[in-house]
Amino acid sequence: MADRFFQNVMPDFVPENPNVIEEEEEEEARHGRIGGHPQGTEESLLRLLSLPYSTLSQQLQRAGLDLKETILVNTWKSTGQQVEDFTLYAGALGTAFLLFKCFQVTHNKNDLSLCLEIIKACDSSSIHSRDVTFICGRAGVCALGAVVAKYMGDDQLLQYYLAQFKELKVSKDHPDELLYGRAGYLWSCLYLNKHFGKETIPSTSTDAIVREIIKNGRKLGTREGSPLMFEWYGEKYWGAAHGLAGIAHVLMQFELTPDELEDVKGTLRYMIRNRFPSGNYPASEDDKGRDVLVHWCHGAPGIALTLIKAAEVFGDKEFLKAAMDAAEVVWNRGLLKRVGICHGISGNAYVFLSLYRLTGIVEYLYRAKAFACFLLDRAPMLMARGEMHGGDNVFSLFEGMAGMAHLFLDMVQPVNARFPAYDF
Ligand SMILES: [Zn+2]
C-alpha cells in the first residue's frame, strides 16, 4: 500500500518567516555562497514553506505559467494544432481550460484568444460526439466556449455555443454518473447558469433529468442502506468520478423536494457510517474490504469535496466534521506518486483549499501550500528519476501536468480556488 504514496513527513505547520530572504542574503554575504537554492532536500522544502505567502505565490505563479508554455507546445503547437482527443479530462479542452485560468490570474489577453482558438478546434472535432458532460463530452466544449466568447466580447460566437449546447441530447442510454452521464450534463448547466444568469438553461429543461437520476437511484437504493444507489458498468461506485459522491454533489445544487433532499442527505450519511476505520472511503459497494485509494476519482478526496459542498448547502455540522476527518486521510496518505488532479497530489490539495475557503482555518491553507510546495520542489526531479508518474496523458488537465499548473495558479488566489469542473 505504501508504494502508492510518499510518506508525508512535512511538519503539521510551519509559520511564515518574513525575514527568511534577508537572513539568507546575510548568510551568503558572510560565507560568500552564490547561486540558487538546492532542490529536493528537506531544507529546500522547509525553506519554501517558511517563505512569506506573497513571495511563494509569485514563485508558484511563475512555475504555473512556465508549465503552461510547455503544455501548449506539447498539446497544441507541436501537433499542428490538430485535436485528437478533445476532452477536458485528457485532451485539448484541458489545455484551453488552463489558459482560461492563466487569463483569470494575469489578465493576459493572448492566453484568452489562444484558449478560444483551441476551443474552436475542439468544437470541430467533437461535433459528432454523443458524450454530453463537461469533463468528457461536448457540453464542456460548448459551455467553456460560450464563457470564453463572453470574455472576448464576441456575442455572435457566444450565441453559437449556447445554441450548440442546447442541441445536446441526454438519452436513455446515458449513465447517471459525472464523467459520462446525466450528472455531468447537469453540472455543465450549472456552469452556464453561474456565468450567464439563473435561467440560461431553464429549470424546465433540467428538472426532468434531475427527476430521472433520483428515480434511477431509488430503484437501486434501499431503506436500510443507501436511499440512492447507481451503477456504472455493473459497479456501484461511491466516488466523485463515477459514483455517489459526484452525483450527490450535483443534485444538491438543484431545487429538490423535501423527500429528495432527505434521500441525498441519507446517501451521504450512509457513506459516512460505512467508511473505513481509517476514515477513508471504499471505491464501491463491493470494495469495502480494500482501503487503498485516496483519489479524487475514488476515495476520501472526492467525497470530502462533496461533504464540504453539503456543509455549505445544508449548514449541517455533521458533514463538515466528516469532511475534516476525510481531509486527515488526505494529509496522511494523499501525497500520491502522481501529479494530476484525478488521482494525484494536485487534486488532493484542493480538499484543503475548499476547507480553507469554508472555515477560514489557516492550517488548511498551509496543508494545500505544503502539497503544492512538495510538487514545486520535487515533482520534476522525481518524475525524471521514475519515482513519480506524470500520468497516462502527461500534459493533460486531469491526469498530468496541466492539473499541477492549475493548482499552482489557484494558490495565487486561494479563496478563488476551485477543483476544475467540480467545484464552483
Ligand atoms: Zn482518477
Image (cartoon, grey):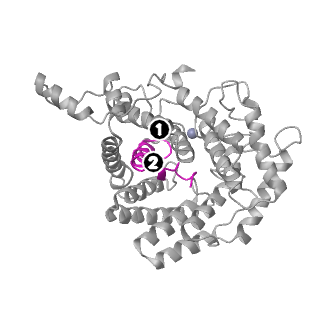
| Residue that mark 2 sits on | 414
Which type of secondary structure does the marked residue at label 2 adopt? helix
Residue 165 locus on image (x, y percent):
59, 69
Q: Amino acid at mark 1?
A: Ala
Residue 419 in magenta stretch: yes
Q: Is residue 296 left or right of residue 175?
A: left
Q: Is residue 207 left or right of residue 18?
A: right
Residue 89 locus on image (x, y percent):
52, 49
Q: Is ligand 1 less than 8 Å from the beta carbon at label 1?
A: no
Q: Quadrant of residue 235?
A: top right
Q: Is ligand 1 less than 8 Å from the beta carbon at label 2?
A: no
Residue appearing at x 47%, y 75% in the figure: 157
Which type of secondary structure does the marked residue at label 1 adopt? helix
Residue appearing at x 35%, y 27% in the figure: 46
Q: Marks 1 and 2: in contact by CB < 8 Å?
A: yes
Q: Is residue 252 above or below residue 229?
A: below
Q: Is residue 201 left or right of residue 268?
A: left
Rounded to the nearest whole Å, what is the CA distance between mark 2 and mark 1?
Answer: 9 Å
Residue appearing at x 77%, y 65% in the figure: 208
Q: Amino acid at mark 2?
A: Pro
Q: Which residues are magenta?
A: 395-424
Q: Is residue 236 in sight in this rendering?
A: yes
Q: Nearer the viewer, residue 414 or 388?
A: 414
Q: Residue 5: which numbered mark, if any?
A: none
| Residue that mark 1 sits on | 368
Residue 279 in magenta stretch: no
Residue 290 locus on image (x, y percent):
68, 25
